[in-house]
Amino acid sequence: MASENIWVIDDDESIRWVLEKALRNADMDVTTFENADEALEVVRANALPPDAVISDVRMPGSDGLSFLSVMQRTHPQVPVLIMTAHSDLETTVNSFEKGAFEYIPKPFDVYSIIEQTRRAIASRPNEQTRPQNLVTGAVRQIGIQPAKILTNEPGPATHTELIGDAPAMQDVFRSIGRLSRSKITVLIHGESGTGKELIAQALHRHSPRANFPFVALNMAAIPHNLLESELFGHEKGAFTGADTRRLGRFEQANGGTLFLDEIGDMPAHLQTRLLRVLADGQFFRVGGTTPLQVDVRIVAATHQNLMEQVRNKTFREDLFHRLNVIRIDAPPLRDRRDDIPLLLHHFLRKAANELGVSSKQTTPEFEDYVSTLAWPGNVRQLENTAHWLTVMAASNVLEIGDLPDTVGDNAIGDTSVFSASGDENDAAAWQQSLRSWATLMMANNESGLLDKAVPEFERIMIECALKKTGNRRQEAARLLGWGRNTLTRKIRELNVQA
């Protein structure tokens, strides 16, 4: 049987070379194109289509999304994998809305692309295998010449505050893209300040319900005795103070999306009522006797461990499974540190626009330092800090000393070498602590840093090894990867109390 034929479209010769070599090593035939117009010429010549296509987005001439649209019209059975070095939410969603099988940000893992290509081929309807040389023959028959270089760069992406290049954020973008045509219930999990409501708004904005209301309700912000009326509304006279009929959030969101933030704080009796609404779309206003029918998509969010609450009997298991159909994890800022300078610039520009002043500028040293801080309040804390700096920093170019004390107090490490982060769950805390210390020392023009850091590192490692082994030096040396004599010498040199 003939091998699968894969088209690779990218104006970067090195990308074409890497993918061609990798896919051929995976027993696939590969036809490469340096731009989408070349590939479209082959499509229009009625050549036999490929089994799958891997295409860049930004290229001279027609872009990857234009090519994808043509393929969806002419050969909808051919899966197209879109890749780009300029990934953002709007491009990701557009790719999936136009029919992309997968969206791959650059730089990519070659083995992952091979696996994704195999999955794409397996997703095709069964067809008889075709001779493998027809596509290549069509290319030769047409006699394609290199396309003229045309400027066709996409315009600026639609403004959104859900931004980031980190892999964790790319996972969020892909989830939103895959759900763009769906009405399915979604549960967003993440720490406070990670942008859970922004994700919910993006899900709504890129859904068939976009022209209907997006209504949000924070369970933790409303007294429990008022939540039932907030959710379901009430009839006139239902309780003291109910002077008029009031529509609840479900009715306000009819046709659209209802975002239930901090769902883990919902009282038990309301969990039961919510479950019934999710089951049949019907409910009663408080004090009402007529059932009401609504068509609402539920997007819930929480920073709590709902499975733990289920085990503790504080959250209904059946409701959890109703809500947890699709889960999106909003990453904490510490898991997307490379995005911190990008977000900081965005928030500084935003604060400057709001205040009608010029935007503060940053230096690489400043960006490196803020990228090592803990940011327990996540993106929200970073945004508040950018606003504070815009108002309070005297200079137009920000320095580390301009940061508020509260931010410095939340640094992963203080100015002592290898100070503890206090976060026992962060396996990389010591590395971030070292980075924070090194950045601060270099900003202060300190020298001889390795002479200070290496002995301290070795001393801590020796002390921990000796504690672990009960001062058995042979065993401690094995843990450290040293010989016993080396350990004994280091103990003496570093004056370790053993």
Image: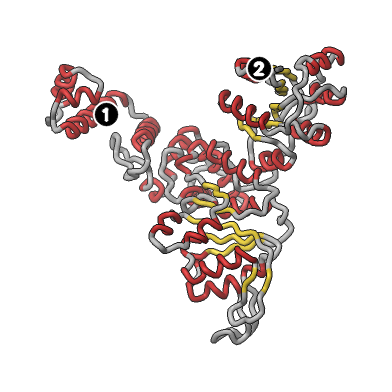
Nearer-the-camera pick, 49 or 200: 49
Left/right of residue 38 with respect to residue 11 in the rendered view: right
Asked whether the residues under the numbered discs 2 and 1 touch, taking CB atoms below 8 Å apart as contact, a structural biologist would say no
Quarter in which the C terminus is drawn = top left
The type of residue carrying mark 1 is: Phe
Question: Which picture quadrant has residue 246?
Answer: bottom right
Kindly state the secondary structure of the residue where label 1 is placed. helix
Nearer-the-camera pick, 270 or 35: 270
Residue 177, position in %: x, y? Answer: 65, 43
Residue neighbourhood size for the residue with mark 2, other residues' Cα within 10 Å, grouped as few (<14), some (14–19), many (≥20): many
Left/right of residue 91 with respect to residue 494 in the rendered view: right
Nearer-the-camera pick, 111 or 495: 111
Kindly state the secondary structure of the residue where label 2 is placed. helix
Q: Residue at 75% across / 40% down in the picture?
A: 98
User: Would you say residue 262 is visible in this rendering?
Assistant: no
Which residue has dot 1 on it?
A: 457
Which residue has dot 2 on it?
A: 20
Residue 241, position in %: x, y? Answer: 56, 85
Residue 472, position in %: x, y? Answer: 13, 28
Q: Residue at 29% across / 28% down in the picture?
A: 453
Nearer-the-camera pick, 342 or 468: 468
Quarter in which the N terminus is drawn = top right
Of labels 2 and 1, earlier in sequence is 2
Residue 316, position in %: x, y? Answer: 47, 62
Question: Which picture quadrant has residue 38?
Answer: top right
Q: Residue at 61% across / 64% down in the picture?
A: 279
